[in-house]
Image (spheres, rainbow, N blue to C red):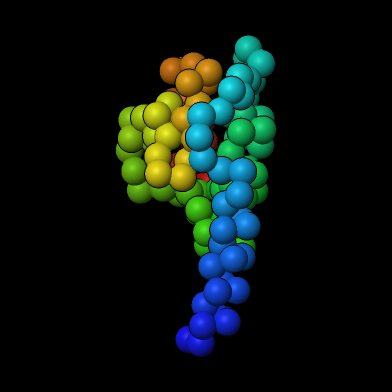
Amino acid sequence: MTNPIRFSLVAVMAGALAGCGGASDYKPVAGSAPEQIFAEACASCHGEKGSGKFGFLLKIAGSDHEVAEITGKIAEGGMVMPSFPEIGEAERAALATYIKAQ
């Protein structure tokens, strides 16, 4: 792969991830369905229904991870993923189950 192509690919990926990372102050409205929480808090980075950006980048739909692992990632975040401390434990579990079912 030539340097200009490699640079372009890196630039596209960086642009796709812009806005992801850090801690989020997102707080769902009480009683929000997991689909709504996903649409409001997750879809901008993970794509519609977790299909990922451009069909592969940050795909989480149908994750092989256990619900407890996913809920932990939602609460604590990761290298690029922001933490969502304002999403309650029960809501995180429902969201993780929703993600696995996609």
Which residue is outermost to the bottom? 2
In percent of width and height, residue 79 lies at 40, 44
Q: Is residue 23 visible?
A: yes
> At 48% from the left edge and 86% from the top edge, which residue is drawn?
1
**Is residue 69 left or right of 29 when viewed as pictured?**
left
In percent of width and height, residue 2 lies at 51, 87
Is 14 drawn above or below residue 90 in the view shown?
Answer: below
> At 43% from the left edge and 26% from the top edge, which residue is drawn?
75
Is 29 drawn above or below residue 48 in the view shown?
Answer: above
Is 79 drawn above or below residue 67 in the view shown?
Answer: below
> At 41% from the left edge and 47% from the top edge, which residue is drawn?
63
Which residue is more in the foreground, 58 or 11? 11
Residue 32: quadrant of the picture: top right
Which residue is outermost to the top? 30
Which residue is more in the foreground, 4 or 68? 4
Q: Is residue 49 visible?
A: no
Residue 31: quadrant of the picture: top right
Which residue is more in the foreground, 49 or 26? 26
* Picture mark count: 0
In percent of width and height, residue 53 lies at 60, 57
